[in-house]
Image (cartoon, coloured by chain):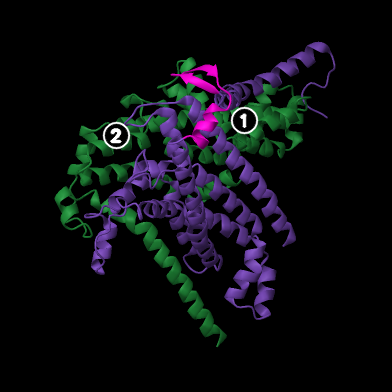
Chain colours: A purple, B green
Amino acid sequence: MTDGWRHTERPFLWRRALWIAALLTPALVVMVLFVLWPLLSAFRFAFYEFNGLRPSGFIGLENFRQVLFEKPFSDWTYNALKHNVIAFLALMVFENGTAFLIAFALLKALPGHRVHQVIVFLPVVLSAVIVGFLWKLFLHPLFGLVNQLLGLVGIGAVPWLGNENTALGSILFANIWHWLGFPTLVLLAGMQRISKDMLEAARLDGAGDYALMTKIVWPLIAPSVTIVTILTFIGSFNWFEIPYVMAGLTGSPGGSTDVLGLYFYRTAFGSTTTGIQDFGQGSALAVLMFILVAGVTAIALRYLRRREIEQ
Amino acid sequence: MRDRGETVRNGAIQLLLAVNAVIMIYPLFVMVTSSFKTNAEIFSSPLSLPTHFSTANLEKVWTETNFVRYLANSVGITAASVALILLFSTLAGYAIARYRFRLSSLVLMFFLSGMTVPLKLAIIPLFIQLDTLGLVDSYLGLVLVYVAMGIPSAVFIMTGFLRTLPRELEESARMDGASELRIMWSIMLPLARPALVIVAIQNAVPIWNDFFFPLVLITSDNLKTLPQGLTVFVGEFTTDWGVLFTGLTLAALPITLLYIVLSKQFISGITQGAVK
């Protein structure tokens, strides 16, 4: 290998080692202090009781027992988890389903397709806080844009965010509006990698758009589908900003929009009403969420990758 | 016959895309136009265009709120974080890519494993760590968290890119007696500009938009970032929708303008960033 100091004399080797160490040190220090150490501590803290900001005593699995099996904590945990699961399924069907259709439409590269790509991705670059507040105003029962438009076609005012049956769906709608461009362009990139010859050949054999979409495009974009599925899963289980902005810290109304991210934040940093904070229980929740997301992701990756190879 | 079917299908596709474009753009259009309306106008005729372009809301946001401060904080924090991510990851990536040393693959592995860590879930120990260092409720604490979050994928990209640069350049400079620092700074790094742009966009957008870390780490109103400041702002002006729409419009404006100019880089940067 030929680099810098080819001499073998000691002073040169030392200078070389020092130079390399100097290059690596800043990044390594930041990583150790603010990623590695907090991460290891996160697992440790889950087994401790807390007195304010400091761990006060080892209590084994007590925090886990509380959040999983002791009421009312366990009720909150499963209620939130249920909404994360609903969010994941709804986003897979409605967000990624729409994204697939739009990507397929963009693949045709008809006039204006570049402008449409820029448009569909525009909300993605905005902060979830902006998107959440904007839709909260639009979903206002009396003066909001949505009910005003529905009023034009004779549909009465719906209290979208105030009703337990419609709140989660409304928040999911805002989320889909925010993120739609992302799976769209990831899927489009996957479609564009399919060879033109193969698409041409299928067309010459008389395949229509529908056959082309289901028999050629869908199987061949398996890697992109894997990525989109995994990212949707991670996103659904770390969901926080839009529910926080649109439904508040307690997932109102009546906990119908509570998700694990909100519940974790309330437990760790105190709800606005009670001000109680419990770092021990919070750490246990964080560890459980980490295991859930990492575990399911690992299993899903194995399964989805196998599907890719079979295709 | 076939052409006719093709025309119909293309028409259907254009219709789908047009409907989607309206759904994406119309809410933003209403947001912008509402910011020029008076409150009474918004409530009485929410769908109509403003009768005259009033800048009263804008003046209110500018003078009666801390908006400008939030904006400046966001600019400063994003710029400082991105600059440090670029600097640290370039140095580390340069060491891994251009020198052969015993621990190099281990060091790279360490950085890469950081890409899989969801730092939000480690917020409790992170908070305690920053509290111990006296960095809670400070710019520096927030910036260091962002730098830690950005480094893993930035090192990955920089290492990959710096490896592709030809050895010959380096060798001939060394023959001429240039120091290692000089070779890195004036010969190799200027060539790495495309990778630096990708890393910068990939990190700047999520940092600029982040809400979670300021929510936990920043409490002083004067240190709040724009997304966090918006929640304060919305709390204060709950019923003044003209001011709310103006605040949202102003908050969305900088990144939207940048996106329109650099849409290609934004799209590839953000999609690649998450796909890594």
- Amino acid type, mark 2: Val
Q: Nearer the viewer, residue A296 or A306?
A: A296
User: Given the image, what chain letter belongs to the residue carrying mark 2?
Assistant: B
Callout 1 crowding tier (Cα within 10 Å): few <14, some 14–19, many ≥20: many
Q: Which of the marked residues, 2 or 1, is nearer the chain's N terminus? A: 1
- Amino acid type, mark 1: Thr
What span is in magenta?
A: A48-70
Residue B105 placement (x, y as % from top left): 75, 31
Name the disc covering residue B232, or none: 2
A44 vs A132, left or right, is right
Look at the numbered discs 2 and 1 and tell me whether their residues touch, using CB distance below 8 Å: no
Number of marks in the rendered image: 2
SS category of the residue bearing label 2: helix
Callout 2 crowding tier (Cα within 10 Å): few <14, some 14–19, many ≥20: some
The alpha-carbon separation of the residues under discs 2 and 1 comes to: 37 Å
Magenta stretch contains residue A66: yes
Q: Nearer the viewer, residue A56 or B28?
A: A56
The residue that mark 1 highlights is B90
